[in-house]
Every structure is written in C-alpha cells, then in structure tokens.
Amino acid sequence: MYLHQWLEALQITNLEKGLGKDLLHFAPELVLCFTIVLMLFLRLFTGLNRLHLGSIALVLTAVALLINWDAWQNAGGSDVMFTGLLVFDNFTLFIRFFLLTFTLLIIWLTLLTGIPDYEDSADFYVLLLGAVVGMSLMASANHLLMVFIAVEMASLPSYALAGFLKGKRRSSEAALKYVVYGGGASGVMLYGISLLAGKFGTAYMPDLAAGITVALKATNGLDPILLLGMLFVLVGFAFKISAVPFHFWCPDVFEGAAAEVAAFLSVASKGAGLALLGRFAFAMAGLTKLSVPDPNTWLQTAQYLGMAIAVFAAITATFGNLAAYLQTNMKRLLAYSTIAHAGYMMMGLATLTRDGLSAVLFYLIAYLFMNLGAFAVVAFLRNQTGSEDLSSYRGLMQRAPVMAVTLGVFLFSLLGMPPLIGFAAKFQIFYALFEAGKLYSHAQPPRSGLSFTMYALLVIGALNTVISLVYYIKVLKVMALDRPVEDLEGGTPAPLRVPWGAALYSSLLAAAVFLLGILPNWYPLIDYSQQGVSHFVLEPSVDILERPPGMLRTGR
C-alpha cells in the first residue's frame, strides 16, 4: 500500500520535473502566447482603442528573441518536449531565431507604413503572432498529429491576414482563394497522415522511420500505401511552400493582400514549411539523432523521397522564373520570384545530406533580408504613389533615389549577383548538390540515378539563375531608364517625399544584404547554419555506407 502510494508520488514528481523542463524549452512560444492574451485583454477597454499595440508586440517579441538566443548559447544536444510531440534541438532554435527576427522586422515595418491602424492593431498582431506560434511548432514537430495541428495553427491566422484590408474586393477574394486551397490541401494531408498511422500503428516520426525500413525491405521498395501516404502528406507541405503545382494561391493572395502581409507570407510561411519538410524528410530517412541509423534506409528513402523533392524543386524554380516574365504588378512579380526561390531551397533538401540542410538554413537568413527588403520598398512606395504596378516605378531613380538604389540591391541579391548575400546563399546550395552527386556515385552499390539527379539539379539551378536575370533587370530598367508618366504627359515629375524612417529601414536591410555578402566567412552566419543541424541530423558519409546499422558517425 505504502509502496504503491510512494510510486505514484514519484511519478507525479517526475512528471512535474519533466513539465517544468518542457515549459522552459517552450518559453519563447509562451511569451508570444502571453502577448496574444494581453492584446486581446487590452481590447476590452474602449478607452485604449486609440493606442497602437504594435509597440507592445515589438517589445515582447524582442523578449522572446532574447530568451531563444540565450537557449541557443546554452544548447547542447537533442531533447523531446511534451512526451515526444515536439523536439528541442539546435534546428528548432535556429528556425525560432529566424522567425522571431523576421517578426520583429515585420512589426517595425508595419509601424512605419501605418498598416494596421490604431483601431485594428490588436487584431492584426494577434493574428500575426498566432501564425508565428504555429510556424514555430511546425519546425519542432515530431509527431504527425502535431504536424497537422501546427500547419493549421499557422494557416488559419494567415487566411485572415490575407483579407485584412477591409472594403477591398481583391483582398477578400485573395483570402477566399487562400481558404479554399488551404482547406483542400489540409484535407489531403490529413488523409495521408491517416494512411501512414494506420499502416504502421504510430504517428511518431522516429517510429515511422523504423516501420518504413521494415516495409521497404519486405516489398523491395514498392509499398503502395506507404507511397500514397507520403505523397498526400507532401501535398500539405507543398502548399505551405507554394511548390508547383500547389502554387495557385500564391500570386493572387500576394496581389490582393497588403504588401506587409505578402512579405510575411513570403518569408515566414516559406521558412516554416521548408523546416517542416526538412524535419519530415530526414526523419523518414532515419538520419535524425532520435532515429536508429541505417545506411540502407537512407539510400532507399533518398531514391524515392529525395528524387520526388528534386523533381518538384526543378519544376518549381523553372515555372516561377518563367511565369514572372509577363507580370506588371510588383507583388505578383515578387510572388513568382518567391516560388522560384522555394524551388532553390528544395534543391538543398533533395540532397538528404547534412550539408544540404545547412545550406538551406543559410539561404533562409539571406532570403529574410533580401525578400523582406523588396516588399518593404513596395509598401513604402505604395504609400507615396498609391499604386503597386510596375508603371508607377518609372523614373524612380530621379524621384526617390534611396528607394531605387535599395530596391536594386535587393533585386540583384535575389538574382544571386556577387558580392551580395544572395550569391553566397545560392553557392551554398549548388556546392551541396555537387557534393551529394559525388556521395551517391560512390555509394555501395552506386546510386547513379541519384547522382545524375543531383548534377542535373545543379545545372537547372544555374540556368534558372540566368533566366531570372530578365525580369529583375526589367524592374531596374523601368526605375533607371524609363521616363516618369508626368514627364511623358508634358509635366514635371515631382520627387517622392519618402519618410526618413522608411529610408532608414530599407537602407539597413540593404546594408545587411551587402555586408553579409562580402564577409560570409568572417561573419558567423555559416557557422550558425552548420550548428543549426549539428544536434539534429546525422552525417552520412561514404566511408560508413558498408558499416552495419547503428555505426553511423554523429559528428563532423
């Protein structure tokens, strides 16, 4: 009797200790949740309707960022949270840092542009931070049920944000399209999850990886239920990344939504979706620290899952760049550019190697600065000209030289022009593809198909970089060489009075794009991206391919 009571008390004590540790690991998300509750509470007081809550959101997001930075400095290993539903490792911390830094910058941008206004500020930032919490969960999900919950937590606030411009038909239409496509993709993904969980009797990703190992050996790599379930789950991921052919929502939503919301969706949603795809793909390949390593599982998974990601990456990058040619609206042009860059980052994931995932993390940081900067300039110029069409950028070099120069820096970086950060990011992806091609060619037995695919992706990525030159140069040509509309009509083009805050914001982002590009080895960004995968992904290497399972090397 007493022994039974003592054991129960011991279990409760252990549960309390485990919960305390989990809540400590979960502290940044808790701060964001507290911020959401606080802003909803403040909305109860009508006298505070004239108080803009962006400052509160900015300060508390900075607190969450500092907490995450402290955890990054003291991180050492991989751990699970909440009975294995989430993972706490350097990969989680890196994506959190990426999301919180971006959220801080996007809140600052909204304070400069005036969207949202005082009355709607609480609603806007509640939706924004709610989506960020869901995206953070996407990066740390370790169970397919948590994957679905996290995707929905990130998606539902995003639908509302897309239609946040009240009274505008195009904004409402964009939100409706987003909801319809998102609902369909979520349903397909949930059906895929049910197939995998039903077949293997678990939705815990490391256990799924072990079940996949057995299934592939029993069926010689061809299991219809497994392939169908994986395909349906990937549909949900592809929707968040806006990978072709699940990209239809992206241009319309970006055009109808405010430029600030489009910037948020283009960077944060892509980053979280790629992080989720990376965690899922590497877990299914048995290459995570929580998996039982098996070189054969890695190679067989790469042959199917890696090949599928590679095909979608090539199609996505090519379609995005070709479709951007005929766009006359800047937000639609940047939307297709976003699709193309999602394809580049998927190329890194297709390698299913540690260097490939590290290159994707590096690319995300570069993408944060250059894509946010481009959308920020669009938002600032919208406030001045009332238009987001490319024609309103005619003669911008004479009318607003700071905006024209900074936008040029962002576009050249998106192109991948040295010495900007975009060049360093693409170089990391292409180098990972080259190394993966060599790795698969030296496997035992050699995977010549995978090796050829990696080299083909490298060529396709380089060709797409050349193709994208056309539409980026088109924007620069309109800004620098075309005459303003007022000049063509016989009038005198008036200079645009850009606020100093807007000029400072865009200039700081442009400086970051330039400095991080010319000093990539001096600045610890490369080290951080490698550290971001150090406690998450095992390192497949040629010299261990013939070793028995369990003999994989775990460090560099």
Image: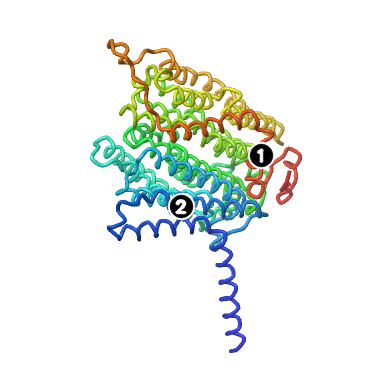
Quadrant (top left/top right/bottom left/bottom right) for the N terminus: bottom right
Q: Give the image location of residue 511, x and y in percent.
A: 55, 31
Q: Amino acid at mark 1?
A: Pro
On screen, residue 251 above or below 139: above
With 461 as the anchor, is 249 left or right in this view?
left
Q: Quadrant of the C terminus?
A: top right
Label 2 neighbour load within 10 Å: few <14, some 14-19, many 20+: many
Q: Position of residue 148 (x, y in %)?
A: 44, 52
Q: Badge 1, how many Cα within 10 Å: few under 14, some, many 20+? A: few
Q: Circle 2 sits on which residue?
A: 133
The residue that appears at 44% across and 33% down in the rendered structure is 500
**Residue 78, image quadrant:** bottom right
Residue of label 1:
524
Q: Which residue is at the front of the view, 510 or 422?
A: 510
Q: Nearer the viewer, residue 167 or 86?
A: 167
Which residue is outermost to the bottom?
1
At horizontal 63% and vertical 31% (from top left) the residue drawn is 428
- In the image, residue 448 sits, relative to residue 532, either above or below, namely above
Q: Secondary structure at mark 1?
A: loop
Q: Is residue 24 visible?
A: yes
The answer to whether one can see residue 231 in this image is no
Q: Position of residue 350 (x, y in %)?
A: 57, 36
